[in-house]
Image (cartoon, rainbow, N blue to C red):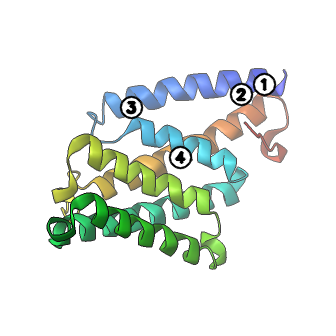
Amino acid sequence: MSLNTALAISLGILGAIATWLFLGPLGGALAIWAAFIAWGCFFHCGGKEQGLQTTIICNAVGAVVAGVTLYIATQTGLGETMTLPVWAGICVGVGVAVMVLLANIPILSNIPAQVYGFACVVALVLLGNAAGNIMAGSLANPVLVIILSMIGGAVFGYVSEKLAGMLVGMGDRAHVKA
């Protein structure tokens, strides 16, 4: 079987299962779209165990940086003083600079993977007006939702790579690059 066919089967089946799981048994508590971003990030980070580790850690760090950035932007009152767009712009600029500086640490060196986590938290906050829940100790917290969603997506990426590798007859030796 060709690699492309194996990927089509693997990603198609597992994509359907992930969607059913996230929207069904998990009751929509997690963000399937963020899981798919992390799934792609897994392949972008090179796949295998190293790609899984990089994806999970960098996505989570980006999500945490976004949470801190959004908390400072929305909860300090400075947005009212200098207007929210100006203050939020400053905060995001600092948050992005922090992510780039964190890339000096080898395990955090994948800046795009951090940005995916950052962007997903910002998207969820903007879509759900959830800035006030950034410190919540529940699934109302957009940082927690995104981290869990992206871990799920990275794991699905790992499993899809393994399944595609088995389908092409190469087992664990296969590195599938989608």
| Residue type, numbered disc 3 | Leu
Tag 2: amino acid: Leu
State the residue position of label 1.
Answer: 4
> In x, y percent, where is residue 115?
52, 57
| Quarter of the image with the C terminus in it | top right
Considering depth in this image, is 79 or 168 the residue closer to the camera?
Answer: 79
Mark 3, residues whose alpha carbon is within 10 Å: few (<14), some, or many (≥20)? some
Q: Residue at x 67, y 21 (%)?
A: 9
According to the picture, the residue beneath numbered tag 2 turns out to be 7
Residue named by callout 3: 21
| Residue that numbered label 4 is attached to | 38
Q: Earlier in the sequence, mark 2 or mark 4?
A: 2
Q: Closer to the N terminus: mark 2 or mark 3?
A: 2
Are there few (<14), some (14-19), or many (20+) residues within 10 Å of tag 1? some
Q: Secondary structure at mark 3?
A: helix
**Element under label 2?**
helix
Residue 14 location in percent, x, y?
55, 29
Q: What is the spatial separation of the Cα atoms under label 3 and label 4, in whole angstroms?
A: 16 Å
Disc 2 to disc 3, C-alpha distance: 20 Å
Looking at the rendered structure, the secondary structure element under dot 1 is helix
Tell me the quarter of the picture where residue 74 sits.
bottom left
Quadrant (top left/top right/bottom left/bottom right) for the N terminus: top right
Provide residue 166's location: percent of width, then percent of height: 76, 33
Question: On the rendered structure, is 13 left or right of 68?
Answer: right
- Give percent across and percent down for residue 33: 43, 36
